[in-house]
Image: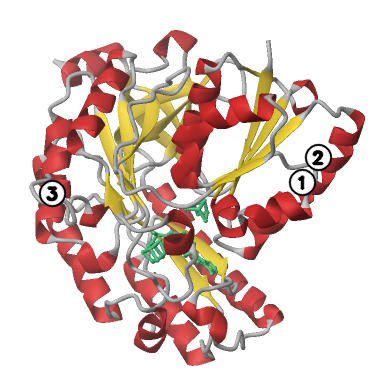
Amino acid sequence: MAKIYIKTFGCQMNERDSERVLALASSCGYTEAASLDEADLIVINTCTVRRKPEQKVYSLLGRLGGLKERRPHLRIAVVGCLAQQEGDGLLERFPQVDLVLGPDRIGELPRALEALEGGERLCLVGFHQDPCQGVLLPLRPSVRAYVNIMQGCDNFCTYCIVPYVRGPEKSRPSGEIIEEVRLLAERGVKEVTLLGQNVNSYGKKSPGELTFPQLLSKIDQIEGIERIRFTTSHPKDLSEELIRAFVDLEKLCEHLHLPFQAGSNRVLERMGRAYTREEYLRKVERLRQLVPRVAITADVMVGFSGEGEEDFRQTLELVREVEFDALFSFKYTPRKGTVASRWPDDVSSEEKQRRLEELQELQRAITLRKNRSLEGQVMEVLVEGTGGRPGQLRGRTRCNRVVNFPGGEELVGRLLWVRITEGLQNSLRGELCPLEVQEAVNA
Ligand code: SAH
Ligand code: SF4
Ligand code: F3S
């Protein structure tokens, strides 16, 4: 039987797309290969949001060229955002590539595989109008699952390639989403993360469709699902109704990922983000007022075109003020075809590196302080799997922190009460609360 190996770069949406690729390939008779060397078909699911993930794809493609010379029957497919961006060009530049498949064309994989088996090389890119994706479960669902609720983005932030490579925003019909979550729950999934580039605008372009808070409330009612998360939210669209959902919906976890990108209004405006620093801070304040225990995480960039030292200081200041639970920070890299790529990339790479390090150092201290402040607390943990060491379990709090604690394998998939014994830089350590506590809380 033919074997497929998939290597995924990029965001959670790509991880979900890779699951769809595997499910579709399996319906065509492929089984998963344990390594590159065993594979008959190698799929690279690509990302082009920054220079680094793109370079990784090109270097992997180079190595696969050598592998294919030794194994001429090997087929190589490039899917995802770089596939959409480069299209046919990838087939021209890389003779080792047989298939180029854009992210909105993944549903066509079975037909593409048939063509590959017939010796064709093909490129399927571009976007469908149809917002349906079909219900396609992961081959081996675990405790947590990703559920795509929308594709594309209409925001066109000036630095960002996503609207070009993922296409116009379209919301998947709520009926299809709810059906998928129901089936996942039947297979034992306890936690779902709803995915979209800007989930807050879910349904806005589809007359009669649910709003995002309404969709959350429907999913909250699905039996078997214990936790709901979502990502990503755009600050400009974070509504009072959505903030209230954290209060009203029992299963919605107290964690919001709310990228701010920059702390200076001048930079935010050049980025086309459509909110000011003050508006961002007001939303954070309102959220904390209604949901005091909420964890807030964000994305931020340093060294955007025109970002001066004073602008950067304002980013540091915002980070100090908000005290994020975790922060994902990146050096700006111009992306071909975006508005900002026509502006000077005028912060030197040494300076970007310096700013990044200063920012990360600041955040590391905040993260550690916050993690330590949880010592002694009893927290609800969903056990996701066994930990690195024997006899250890790994789970996650509602606020999305990883907790390692001693316990037996039979507890995987359970919601348990764990006392936090140590707050570390990237995770927590804990111990299971006694049986009486577990029972008392679950009664
Ligand atoms: N839809 C999400 C972000 C998607 S891209 C949002 O609106 O926030 C993920 C992150 O990559 C972004 O939040 C941003 O911080 C970063 N990013 C996007 N384009 C970038 C670029 N050209 N250079 C560096 N970082 C970038
Ligand atoms: Fe990119 Fe902006 Fe869309 Fe996020 S909202 S995907 S940063 S264009
Ligand atoms: Fe990358 Fe595409 Fe996601 S560019 S970040 S894989 S949407």
Question: Which residue corresponds to the image point at 70% horizontal and 20% vertical from the top-left?
Answer: 34
Looking at the rendered structure, the number of numbered marks drawn on it comes to 3
Marks 1/2: CA–CA distance: 5 Å
Q: Which residue is mark 2?
A: 64
Q: Which residue is more in the foreground, 95 or 292?
A: 95
Question: Which residue corresponds to the image point at 38% horizontal and 29% vertical from the top-left?
Answer: 145
Q: Within the displayed image, which quadrant is ligand 2 positioned in?
A: bottom left
In the image: residue 131, left or right of residue 122: left
Amino acid at dot 2: Leu
Q: Residues at badges 1 and 2 in contact (C-beta under 8 Å)?
A: yes
**In the rendered view, would you say 206 is above or below 347?**
above
Q: Which residue is mark 1?
A: 61
Amino acid at dot 1: Leu
Q: Is residue 365 in sight in this rendering? A: no
Q: Which residue is mark 3?
A: 211
Mark 3 secondary-structure assignment: loop
| Dot in front, 1 or 3 | 1
Classify residue 241 by image quadrant: bottom left
Labels 1 and 3: the sequence-earlier one:
1
Labels 3 and 2: the sequence-earlier one:
2
Mark 1 secondary-structure assignment: helix
| Dot in front, 3 or 2 | 2
Q: Which residue is more in the foreground, 236 or 4?
A: 4
